[in-house]
């Protein structure tokens, strides 16, 4: 049985968000160890606060302080905390209705085990030692047997209001390429480019996907293409990517390998970026031990006529 290829991949980027007056006051309040809600037209207090009533769509702005103590309305035990979660030991996810609020706030409860958690139990906020104006300023909730916490009397106005936050977004997953792409990847390790031909339209697709994107029928006939090809279109990159050791500016383009009916991506090197052009004939450059071309360089051949690659731009 052939080896099943797989690779761990991470997609990660920081998401920067500006805050309106309601969210700004809420997060600034957390920095100051104050929990704020927003009052609706019918007298409900929503925590976390929102800018519009979820029932009536009425714009909201009347901020009110609620207590840092509350009651668990529902919960679920987390046996295996994951990266980035509030606690690194098993804990409970809880919805807590803070004293003075009419909605639940979702956060972690630090408890020794699921037997120590129950609906209706009293809890209080455990504040983070260092606070910056984020939901993580609440480190977690903890069991509490006392009465309601005293309010500070805050009206939601603070010095140096938090006006924006950066929320990192990250997706970790394992990718397995399947039969068609595994054949393509294995061929690359032998410095060959292999596509698959559609039995209906007879087009050759590189990299192959196991099915024709035009006809929708399965493909299985392997066809070796290249190694040379034509640059169909390109862009000049002027912003240096994180963890990519390539000096800017550099050129990244679509390359139609000879014999292929689909252009693939590749970096263009061996030529000044301002001399790169559509129709440039290129060939792959491999590094020792590389499983795919490091970049493509000019072959020295005359440029290809536009009519020969216009359908691949």
Image (tube, grey):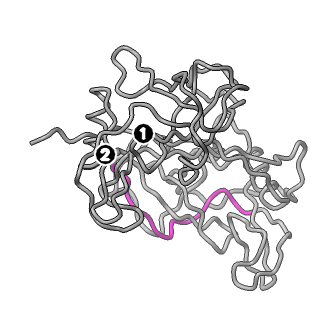
Examine the rendered structure and indicate whether residue 289 appears above or below residue 263. Answer: above
Q: Which residue corresponds to the image point at 58% horizontal and 29% vertical from the top-left?
A: 302
Instruction: Measuring from the top left, give residue 181's x and y in whole percent.
Output: 31, 45
Q: Which residue corresponds to the image point at 70% horizontal and 25% vertical from the top-left?
A: 275
Q: Which residues are magenta?
A: 66-79
Is 45 placed left or right of 173 in the picture?
A: right
**Is residue 67 inside the magenta stretch?**
yes
Q: Are marks 1 and 2 in contact (CB under 8 Å)?
A: no
Quadrant of residue 211 within the rendered picture: bottom left
Graded by Cα atoms within 10 Å as few (under 14), some (14 to 19) or many (20 or more), the crowding at tag 1 reads some
Label 2 belongs to which residue? 181
Quadrant of residue 40 within the rendered picture: bottom right
Q: Which residue corresponds to the image point at 34% horizontal and 49% vertical from the top-left?
A: 208
Label 1 belongs to which residue? 258
Whole-number angstrom distance, CA of label 1 to CA of label 2? 19 Å
Graded by Cα atoms within 10 Å as few (under 14), some (14 to 19) or many (20 or more), the crowding at tag 2 reads many
Examine the rendered structure and indicate whether residue 15 appears above or below residue 270. Answer: below
Disc on the earlier residue, 1 or 2: 2
């Amino acid at each position: 049985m052939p080896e099943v290829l797989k690779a761990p991949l991470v997609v990660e980027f920081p998401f920067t968000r500006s805050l309106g007056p309601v969210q700004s006051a809420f997060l600034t309040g957390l920095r100051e160890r104050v929990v704020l809600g927003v009052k609706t037209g019918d007298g409900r207090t929503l925590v976390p606060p929102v800018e519009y009533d979820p029932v009536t769509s009425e714009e909201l702005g009347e901020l009110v302080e609620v207590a840092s103590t509350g009651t668990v309305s529902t919960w679920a035990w987390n046996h295996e905390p994951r990266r980035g979660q509030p606690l690194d030991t098993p804990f409970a996810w809880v919805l807590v209705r803070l004293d003075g609020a009419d909605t639940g706030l979702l956060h972690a409860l630090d408890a020794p085990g699921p037997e120590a958690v129950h609906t209706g139990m009293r809890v209080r906020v455990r504040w983070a030692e260092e606070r910056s104006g984020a939901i993580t300023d609440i480190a977690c909730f903890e069991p509490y047997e006392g009465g309601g916490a005293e309010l500070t009397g805050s009206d939601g106005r603070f010095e140096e209001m938090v006006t924006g936050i950066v929320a990192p977004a990250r997706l970790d997953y394992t990718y397995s390429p399947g039969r068609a792409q595994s054949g393509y990847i294995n061929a690359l390790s032998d410095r060959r480019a292999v596509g698959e031909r559609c039995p209906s339209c007879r087009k050759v697709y590189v990299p192959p996907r196991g099915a024709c994107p035009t006809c929708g029928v399965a493909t299985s006939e392997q066809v070796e293409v290249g190694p040379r090809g034509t640059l169909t279109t390109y862009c000049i990159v002027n912003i240096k990517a994180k963890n990519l050791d390539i000096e800017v500016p550099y050129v990244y383009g679509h390359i139609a390998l000879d014999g292929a009916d689909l252009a693939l991506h590749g970096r263009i090197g061996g030529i000044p970026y301002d001399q790169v052009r559509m129709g440039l004939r290129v060939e792959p450059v491999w590094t020792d031990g590389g499983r795919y071309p490091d970049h493509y360089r000019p072959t020295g051949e005359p440029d290809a006529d536009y009519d020969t690659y216009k359908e691949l731009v």
